[in-house]
Every structure is written in C-alpha cells, then in structure tokens.
Image (cartoon, rainbow, N blue to C red):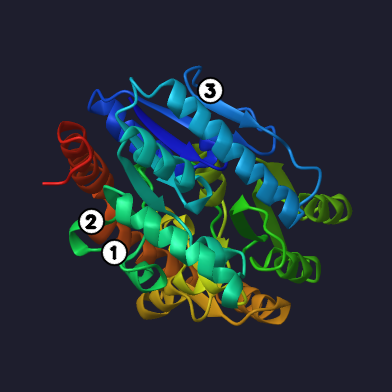
C-alpha cells in the first residue's frame, strides 16, 4: 500500500489527485491520510482514506502549530498500525514529513518527500528561528528515497538535493482544452469584465482584499471567487453588499476550472512580502494556459516573469491601484485581452498538452514502481 500524507483536504488538491489517478491506472493500491481543516465533505469520499478532523476556532499560529503536531501523531500511529501493509509513503510538505521520517527510522518504510512549499518561507520564519527547520528539512531530504519539487527554480530554496534524488513535477492540470470548448464563454468586456479566482482565501499576501477594492470601485467588473480559507468572512461581507462579487465556496477542481473558463481574466497574485512567493510555481499559471485566459499575477515572481516573456497576461506591483489599472486597460482594449488569451492557449497546446501522460502516468509511476521493487532504493 502507498499512503499519501497531506495537511489539507485531498478533495481540493488537484496535484495529489493526478498522482492517485496515475497509480490507480497502474493498479497500485494507494490511500490518503489528510487533515480536514474546514469540515469540507468531498464530492466522492474514499472510505479507505484516513481523515484527521479538527477545525481551528481561529487562525492563531500557535493553535495551528499544535494541530500540526496532533496531525503527525495521528499519522504516525496510523502508519505504525499498518506497517506490515505499508510499502511507501508520500509526504507532502514539511507539515507531514516528520511522521514519514520517523517511520523510516523505526520501521524502515521508504518515503517520497513532495515539497509544494517551503515551510519557513511560507510562514515568514527568519534568522535563528529558521535554523531548526532547515536542519530538520536537511534530515528529511537525506533519508527520503525521492524528493519532488514543483519547479527547477525551487532547488535554490531548499537544502542541497542530489540530482539523482530530485524529480521536477510541475503543477500542470490533467485536462484537455476540448473539455472546456462547449462551456459558455464570456466574449470579453462587452457587458461585464469577469475576474475569476479559484484557491485558498489567504489574507493579505494573495491580493484578494485589493482585488475586491478594485472591483467595488468599477461597475463594469465582476469578481467570481471559489475556495475556502481564513479570509472567507471578509469576502462574504463584501459579497453581501456588492452584487458583482460572487462567492461560491469550495469546489472540486473540474467545476472550478469550468468557472474560470467562463471568466475573462484569471487572478493569481503572489505578493513578495512572503519569501515563498519569490519561488511560486502555482496551478494558476498552468490553468491560464489550459483555459486560454490571461493571468493577472505579481511582478518579480516566476509566473510574473513567464507571462511577461510570453505576453499571456500581466505582472504587476502589489496593491489595489495596479490591479485597477490593468482592469481598466482590459476594458478599454478587449482585443488585446483576447490576444493574450490566444497566446496562452497556443502555449498549452505546444508545450503542456501531453504532460500528464508523459510525466505523471509515465515518469512518476515508473519511479514509484522502482521504489516498490527495491524497498525505497533508486537504481
């Protein structure tokens, strides 16, 4: 059995779902152990998955830290009870890798360390306080059978990873552009300019508050936003007073992409106040290519550099004023808006259309098979 460890709901983790689809197709038994933080019920729950249920009353860093300790205790106990059936663990991020490391040291169970985000960088941990995290990450990387990163640029963010142990798997959706061709499409801002966002409602550093300010100030713009997170009460309060702000709550990835496909611009801001955003490798970059929609993102980040080079969107400074300026530009020049989307569509077709088959169903599943054959040793 292969067990995924995740500190959030697996139902809205599209990358994990791609892994599992590839393993299912290869006939490899896999389960997930995850933290259901928001009490979100999956559309198709897997009865064999293991759910750690705790909904924090607030977003206190200390309460979250204690809950993460509880998650790792829960995970270790579950793995220890199943150690005879457990062949391989895939731990997502530092949040869960310590439980996997402990199983490796005590029971010999091999694990893959799948790094979505740097723990200290995403939480603003600096100076002396960062040292124990760096030491533990180095230890986790040393004992991992394989380390997966979301982008080559992430190699400079983490402790040294040997080339033979490192694998790059980008956040490319498993979908086809034809899946969205028959959906109702907004044909540009002839009526209302529609901005779409699908993801975590993170306060301050994702520009959501600033986007709401820009939308409220312009009657020709709508904001369609789906997901869940700490900023939800703020969004609800503004949606209650502004009929052009539409809040949908959590959505599975397919429905979320359909929502984005009906919009004119995809929102994906990563403010540079968070060190981790300087290495951002988000789903949203690839989703804007898949859907053929321009991406509004942040200057000085990897997606910002890419959209500028390829002219498939805008890379802007932080704040409400730059957002408002881009939206006004898009309203004034709908042909430029459509041209950016068309360039995004062509880039997907030329570079990423077969990514799932080649990298997930091919390379990734192949590496997992090797690890299973050799008890975690790569050959």
Image quarter of residue 234: bottom right
Tell me: 132 left or right of 244: left
Mark sitting on residue 45 = 3
Tell me: 135 left or right of 343: right
Query: Depth check: 374 or 225 in front?
Result: 374
Residue at (52, 43) in percent of width and height: 258
Q: Secondary structure at mark 1?
A: loop
Tell me: 326 left or right of 55: left
Mark sitting on residue 161 = 1
**Placement of 171 over or under 76, stated as above or below:** below
Query: Depth check: 103 or 276 in front?
Result: 103
Image quarter of residue 124: bottom right
Residue at (55, 76) in percent of width and height: 333
Q: Secondary structure at mark 2?
A: helix
Camera-near label (3 vs 1) is 1
Please tell me which of labels 3 and 2 falls first in the chain. Answer: 3
Alpha carbon distance from label 2 to label 1? 7 Å
Q: Are marks 3 and 1 in contact (CB under 8 Å)?
A: no
Percent position (x, y) of residue 306? 39, 74
Percent position (x, y) of residue 308? 42, 79
Query: Depth check: 91 or 133 in front?
Result: 133
Q: Residue furthest right?
A: 241
Please tell me which of labels 3 and 1 falls first in the chain. Answer: 3
Percent position (x, y) of residue 67? 67, 43
Q: Is residue 348 visible?
A: yes
Residue at (69, 57) in percent of width and height: 223
Q: Secondary structure at mark 3?
A: loop
Alpha carbon distance from label 3 to label 2? 33 Å
**Placement of 94 over or under 373, stated as above or below:** below
Q: Which residue is mark 2?
A: 165
Query: Depth check: 314 or 366 in front?
Result: 366
């Amino acid at each position: 059995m292969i067990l995924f460890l995740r500190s959030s709901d697996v139902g809205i983790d599209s990358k994990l779902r791609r892994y599992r689809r590839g393993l299912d197709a290869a006939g490899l038994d896999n389960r997930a152990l995850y933290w259901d933080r928001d009490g979100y019920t999956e559309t198709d729950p897997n009865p064999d998955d293991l759910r750690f249920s705790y909904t924090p009353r607030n977003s206190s860093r200390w309460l979250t830290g204690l809950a993460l300790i509880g998650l790792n205790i829960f995970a270790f106990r579950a793995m220890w009870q199943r150690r005879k059936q457990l062949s391989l663990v895939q731990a997502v991020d530092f949040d869960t890798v310590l439980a996997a490391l402990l199983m490796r040291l005590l029971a010999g169970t091999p694990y893959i360390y799948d790094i979505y985000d740097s723990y200290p960088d995403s939480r603003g941990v600096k100076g002396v306080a960062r040292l124990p995290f760096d030491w533990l990450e180095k230890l986790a990387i040393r004992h991992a059978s394989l380390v997966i990163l979301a982008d080559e640029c992430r190699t400079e963010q983490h402790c040294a990873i040997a080339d033979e142990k490192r694998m790059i798997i980008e956040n490319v959706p498993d979908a086809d552009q034809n899946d969205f061709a028959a959906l109702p499409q907004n044909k540009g801002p002839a009526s209302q300019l529609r901005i779409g966002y699908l993801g975590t409602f993170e306060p301050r550093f994702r520009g959501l508050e600033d986007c709401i300010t820009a939308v409220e100030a312009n009657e020709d713009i709508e904001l369609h936003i789906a997901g869940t997170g700490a900023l939800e009460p703020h969004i609800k309060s503004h949606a209650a007073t502004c009929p052009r702000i539409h809040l949908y709550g959590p959505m599975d990835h397919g429905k979320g992409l359909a929502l984005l496909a009906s919009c004119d611009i995809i929102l994906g801001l990563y403010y540079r106040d968070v060190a981790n955003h300087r290495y951002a490798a988000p789903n949203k970059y690839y989703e804007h290519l898949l859907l053929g929609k321009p991406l509004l993102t942040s200057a000085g980040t990897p997606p910002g550099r890419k959209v500028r080079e390829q002219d498939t969107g805008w890379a802007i400074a932080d704040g409400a004023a730059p957002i408002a300026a881009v939206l006004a530009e898009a309203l004034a020049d709908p042909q430029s808006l459509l041209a950016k989307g068309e360039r995004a569509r062509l880039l997907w077709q030329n570079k990423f259309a077969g990514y799932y088959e080649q990298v997930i169903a091919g390379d990734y599943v192949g590496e997992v098979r090797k690890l299973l054959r050799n008890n975690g040793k790569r050959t």
